[in-house]
C-alpha cells in the first residue's frame, strides 16, 4: 500500500523514468483549455502485457487523469484497480484524494509485473 504525502509538507513527488504523454482527458480539454500532461510510468506496458498473458482483461485508464488509477483489471470474475508506479514513484496528491474517496475495492499500487500478478491472485508471493 502506498502512502500519500501532501505536497504542502515540502516533499516533492518525482517519477524518474516516467514518460510524459499529453492527452485530452476531460471536457475542459475538449473546450480548448490547456491539455494537461499525464505521466505513463515506463513499466506500464510490460505490466499490461503480463496481465493479459495470464488471461486478465485490462482497460488502461491513465488518460482519464484527475487521480484516477492507471488500470482496470478483470480476472477470475473479480475487478481490480491498479496504480502503476516505478520503483521509487509516489502517489500525487490528486491520486491520494481519488483513492481516498473511492468507495469500491481498494486501489492497489504496483511497481512490477510480480506485484501486479500477486495483487490479482495470479502470481507467487512477492517475498
Image (spheres, rainbow, N blue to C red):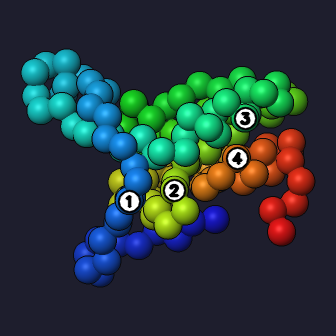
Separation of marks 4 and 1 at Cα, in angstroms: 18 Å
Q: Regarding mark 4 in the picture, which secondary structure is present there?
A: helix
Quadrant location of the N terminus in the rendered image: bottom right
Nearer-the-camera pick, 1 or 42: 42
Instruction: Locate residue 71: give its quadrant.
Output: top right
Name which residue lies at 35% across and 72% down.
Answer: 6
- Find numbered disc 3 in the image and state the secondary structure of the residue it sits on: helix
Q: Helix or strand or loop: what does disc 1 sit on?
A: loop
Query: What distance separates the C-alpha of mark 3 from that of mark 1?
Result: 23 Å
Residue 31 locus on image (x, y percent): 13, 19
Picture disc at residue 28: none
Compared across the picture, whether 78 is left or right of 95 comes to right
Q: Mark 2 sits on what residue?
A: 86
Q: Earlier in the sequence, mark 3 or mark 1?
A: 1
The quarter of the image holding the C terminus is bottom right
Q: Residue 50: give its label.
A: 3
Secondary structure category for the residue under label 2: loop
Residue contact at pointers 3 and 4, CB within 8 angstroms: yes
Identify the residue position indicated by label 1 in the image: 16
Amino acid at each position: 500500500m502506498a502512502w500519500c504525502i501532501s505536497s504542502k509538507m515540502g516533499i516533492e513527488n518525482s517519477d524518474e523514468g516516467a514518460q510524459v504523454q499529453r492527452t485530452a482527458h476531460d471536457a475542459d480539454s475538449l473546450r480548448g483549455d490547456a491539455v494537461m500532461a499525464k505521466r505513463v510510468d515506463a513499466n506500464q506496458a510490460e505490466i499490461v502485457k503480463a496481465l493479459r498473458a495470464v488471461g486478465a482483461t485490462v482497460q488502461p485508464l491513465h488518460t482519464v487523469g484527475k487521480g484516477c488509477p492507471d488500470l482496470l483489471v478483470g480476472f477470475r470474475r473479480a475487478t481490480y484497480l491498479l496504480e502503476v508506479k516505478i520503483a521509487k514513484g509516489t502517489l500525487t496528491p490528486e491520486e491520494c484524494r481519488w483513492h481516498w474517496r473511492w468507495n469500491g475495492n481498494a486501489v492497489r499500487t504496483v511497481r512490477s509485473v510480480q506485484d501486479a500478478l500477486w495483487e490479482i491472485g495470479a502470481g507467487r508471493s512477492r517475498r
